[in-house]
Image (cartoon, helix red, strand yellow):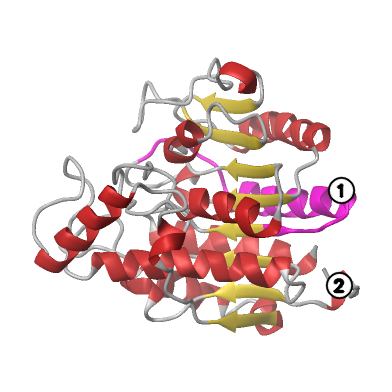
């Protein structure tokens, strides 16, 4: 990385009208209006004027296949062209153009990664991203391509990093990331989520800490329905300790806002202060380690007011840190 004063580098935000096309109509919770709901709130914040805002790019096939199996990518291309049915058991519609929209999400995340690694940004945020349920072989839970997993793979392939931390505060367990790297001791994983006995996808028990040589290297922190900020802060201390011990070379934050009280499909009761705290804390730890690299991805959140407030607080924390 060039020898530049980190504080002189801007915080990057990847957002555009095209990015909002990753969404589903007909009353689907993940509607195409989510980005604009957030931007309306963010524009009222002084932090907005301090951002460098760029359009996403489209991911290449070889980038998608850094994580996903080729046969699955072919399946998405075919279903996207037809525009009928679902990509999974019924959560993720195969809407016309979903391949292109999904590729733009991935490209946007990878663009932010490249800008941070190239020393042109010190932190990054992309609102329509963090699609953490998609596995290497199939779609799941509104997620077509797993931009988080692709970012991990390409940070390794292109930049030679090994210890990459994925931190998730979405109400849903980040199963697509967890199981893809469950046996990888260098893929650091910390996830605060609603207990899988009460919420999709039903995974992420505290006993799930990795397999084989990676046993004990992952951190799953399930919370009961109704858990609030006090519960979050208690568990967050474990994540801070974990990251300081493992010293990641890059930190990804999936900051899904469906963990806020009042989300229509989940049952946690955080406030947006939890999201602000998480982002500020990760920036502080990244700076302590010495690289400062933090990329936050919007993830879930289906109450528009909640996601607008939570993501704005995340961006404010990235700018202030």
Give the answer, above or below, for where 166 lies relative to 292: above
Q: Residue at x 61, y 35 (%)?
A: 189
Q: Residue at x 61, y 50 (%)?
A: 253
Residue 284 among those drawn in magenta: yes
- Label 1: few (<14), some or many (≥20) within 10 Å? some
State which tag comes first along the sequence, 1 or 2: 2
Decide which of 142, 119 is in the foreground and name it: 119
Q: Position of residue 262 (x, y in %)?
A: 41, 46
Q: Which residues are magenta?
A: 266-294
Q: Where is mark 1, residue-wise?
A: 289
Q: As drawn, is 193 to the left or to the right of 75?
A: right
Q: Where is mark 2, residue-wise?
A: 7
Circles 1 and 2, Cβ within 8 Å, touching? The answer is: no
Label 1: which secondary element: helix
Residue 211 among those drawn in magenta: no
Give the answer, above or below, for where 211 lies relative to 42: above
């Amino acid at each position: 990385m060039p020898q530049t004063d980190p504080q002189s580098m801007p915080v990057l935000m990847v957002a555009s009208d095209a990015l909002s096309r990753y969404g589903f109509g007909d009353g689907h919770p993940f509607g195409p209006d989510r980005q604009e709901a957030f931007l309306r709130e963010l524009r009222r914040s002084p932090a907005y004027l301090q951002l460098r805002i760029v359009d996403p790019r489209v991911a290449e096939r070889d980038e998608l296949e850094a994580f996903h199996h080729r046969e699955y990518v072919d399946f998405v291309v075919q279903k996207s062209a037809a525009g009928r049915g679902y990509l999974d058991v019924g959560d993720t519609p195969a809407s016309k153009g979903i391949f292109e929209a999904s590729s733009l999400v991935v490209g946007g995340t990878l663009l932010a990664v490249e800008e941070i690694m190239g020393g042109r940004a010190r932190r990054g945020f992309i609102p329509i991203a963090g699609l953490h349920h998609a596995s290497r072989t199939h779609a799941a839970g509104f997620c077509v391509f797993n931009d988080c997993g692709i970012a991990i793979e390409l940070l390794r392939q292109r930049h030679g990093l090994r210890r990459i931390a994925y931190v998730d505060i979405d109400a849903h367990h980040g199963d697509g990331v967890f199981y893809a790297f469950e046996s990888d001791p260098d893929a650091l994983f910390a996830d605060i989520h609603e207990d899988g006995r009460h919420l999709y996808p039903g995974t992420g028990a505290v006993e799930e800490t990795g397999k084989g040589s990676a046993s004990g290297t992952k951190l799953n922190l399930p919370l009961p329905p109704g858990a609030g900020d006090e519960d979050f802060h208690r568990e967050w201390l474990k994540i801070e300790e974990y990251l300081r011990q493992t010293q990641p070379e890059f930190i990804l934050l999936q900051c899904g806002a469906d963990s806020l009280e009042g989300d229509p499909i989940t049952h946690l009761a955080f406030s947006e202060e939890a999201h602000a705290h998480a982002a500020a804390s990760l920036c502080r730890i990244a700076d302590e380690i010495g690289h400062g690299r933090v990329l936050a991805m919007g993830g879930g959140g289906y109450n528009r007011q909640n996601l607008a407030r939570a993501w704005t607080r995340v961006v404010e924390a990235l700018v202030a840190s």
